[in-house]
Image (cartoon, rainbow, N blue to C red):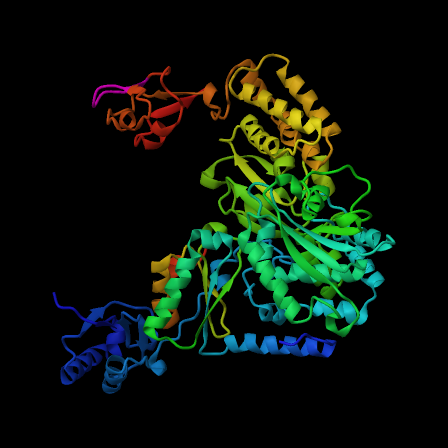
Amino acid sequence: MPAIKSLEELKRVREEALAKKQMKAAPGNVQVIVAMGTCGIAAGARDTMKSVLSYIETQNLSGVTVTQTGCIGMCEQEPILQVIFGDQAKVTYGKVNTEVAEQIMRQHVQGGMPLKDHVLPI
Amino acid sequence: MAFYRSHILVCVDPECLEKGAHELIDALQDELVAQGLLKEIQVLETSRIGSCASGPEMMVYPEGVHYVGMSADDVPFLVEEHFLKGRIIEKFREVHKPVVDEELGPLRPKEVRVVLRNCGEIDPMNIEDYLAVDGYQALGKVIGEMTPENVIDEMIRSGLRGRGGAGFPAGKKWALTRQVQDNPKYMVCNADEGDPGAFMNRRVLEGDPHSVIEGMIIGAYAVGASYGYIYCRAEYPLAVETLNLAINQAREFGFLGNNILGTDFNFDLEVRVGAGAFVCGEETALMASIMGQRGEPRPRPPFPSVKGVWGKPSNNNNVETYANVPQIILKGADWYASMGTARSKGTKTFAVGGNVAKPGLIEVPMGITLREIIFDVAGGIKDGKQYKAVQTGGPMGGCLTAEHLDLPLDYEALAEAGSMMGSGGLVVMDESSCMVDIARFFMEFTQAESCGKCTPCRIGTRRILEMLKKICDGKGKAGDIEKLEDLCHEVAKSSLCGLGQGAPNPVLSTLKHFRDEYEAHVFEKRCPAKVCRKLIRFEIQASTCTGCTVCARNCPVEAIGGERRQAHHIDVNKCIRCGICVQVCNFNAISVES
């Protein structure tokens, strides 16, 4: 990326970033987001992330984007994982250990049915 | 037992039966036989799955795929696609209404997110995520449309005050640094968040590092600085890593370095890692540490705006203050000033901890009451207990009681009540907390963190701690409370920096609001909350004890005796009051007396 040298370029870079963001939210694409702040990592988010990635690999899933984010503010519920189908509202799960992560991948990401038991505090 | 690779559960509720569930089951069986899959796939009947209205419905495991509206004619297609080729047939798939956050109730009512707006929403390691949420647009606006004076005016009008705790208006500080005729000038970001239990800044640094960096660049443009330091504590390794990555990305995109956005404005930035001293959160000690010197404070004036890093004018704000800046520039000072009270504008992040149902990091508008924070945002007191006190402002703050619950939060209101805003720690305590013990806990922290440069803090905090320990141990004498109070006032008045000046606050505020607890410890040798070990004893109630021996077996010092199936008893001379017996007793037969 060459350095931005004018306001017009800054605007263009923003448009490009927005377009990339919208691509992730395209219908048929699923975003899986793992919260990887210090609190999440301490609670085991790295293992959760590995579990998600290995599920995608073994099942050969396509159309799933896995990203990370920071702390959401509910550290006692970590590891936190979020699932977004296309442009729909996000579903946030708490205390996602490796087993729950696999269950979410199978039942929600692949099967389309959210796991109500693990959705964050009612 | 036969092993099936798939199970098909077909709903046989009346509604689905009417729509042909039985015919569907028969067709499935026939097709499985025809394809030779009968030993691999099992067809079962089940009750309602959830969508009889669009039935007949079925569920396929292990995938958990919910199919609806299929007729017997579709079965060969289904078996071929799904069970032979492994493809899910989208056109028969039940579309589930997603479970949205709103349906589950807003996660935290009354929150307003300005500083935390992107935390948990974007990928902090990817600058494009930040650019997509208007990242660096404020910088573009500043450089394209505003003079440094305009920026400072806007900041002053917004009413943003230093979020590190002292609450000095950020715009005025920028103006002071700008006025000084000396170059180069430095921007400093205080990311040495050391209060126990407070980690609001870590969340911003790890979750949205670019907002802090953008705030610092805008500040540099306004005060005329050419270089900056982010002083981050070593205990935040992930924050340091995220910041360094973000700085490199910002440099690559041309937001840092020479000729930013094609203008003649130059600014660059580096992270300095602290070595774990709490006192380095004090600005003069922090700057000494940046320069590689011992992290000790020095008397002010001269203030850092005049003589800071390398003896040059330096503008120091904390993480949260800088993270507010881009939003104020983008949305305007009036928008920001519309939130909060007359004296304190905008929002504030808090780390709510202690005995609350929903602890966590929150951001609320200034002027909200403690009651709203504790009972609405944080879900009230845990386990149905009674609220007793809240400690605000970290180890140098004060304890506030039930009478302060309706206090609207702003810098002055908290100071008038004998506490302070601090950086935003809120520790909520219920009836089972002993206030003398709490004061002792915070004093232990500040005493250990005193740098030792000035006598009142070095020796005073140690003497205060010794007196508190004496009182907790039941060795207090008449006159001790008054002596403790005098010493606290002296230390607060004569210490060099904020650490010593604030250290006595937890003692003074608990003395003010909970003097009766101190008196109970001193005169009656009693701890009303039954916390202080030397003042309590454990007793087994003979009427409820079943003689199960679990307490005797778990006692680390063999202080519990008694025959099996007979009431047990505790030898008070051997007992070390560890409380293990209370935890292991299944019959609540052990009580704590004071």
Q: Quadrant for residue B556, please give it.
A: top left
Magenta region, main secondary structure = loop
Residue B427 versus residue B211 in the image, above or below: above
Pick out the residue farthest to the front.
B292
- Label count reads 0
Name the foreground residue: B459 vs B549.
B459
Instruction: Please check the rendered image and state whether residue B352 is part of the magenta-colored stretch, yes or no.
Output: no
Residue B61 versus residue A12 in the image, above or below: above
- Residue B138 locus on image (x, y percent): 72, 67
- Is residue A112 visible to us here? no
Name the foreground residue: B311 vs B3.
B311
Q: Quadrant for residue B94, please give it.
A: bottom left
Residue B300 relative to residue B205: left or right: right
- Residue B78 locus on image (x, y percent): 26, 83
Name the foreground residue: B380 vs A70.
A70
- Residue B454 locus on image (x, y percent): 71, 30
Instruction: Please check the rendered image and state whether residue B569 is part of the magenta-colored stretch, yes or no.
Output: yes
- Is residue B231 visible to us here? yes
- Residue A93 locus on image (x, y percent): 43, 59
Name the foreground residue: B263 vs A65.
B263
Identify the residue at image location x=69%, y=78%: A9
Q: Quadrant for residue B555, please give it.
A: top left
Residue B276 relative to residue B593: left or right: right
Identify the residue at image location x=59%, y=71%: B128
Pick out the residue farthest to the top.
B478
Figure quadrant of the N terminus of chain B: bottom left
Report the magenta residues as a range.
Answer: B561-570
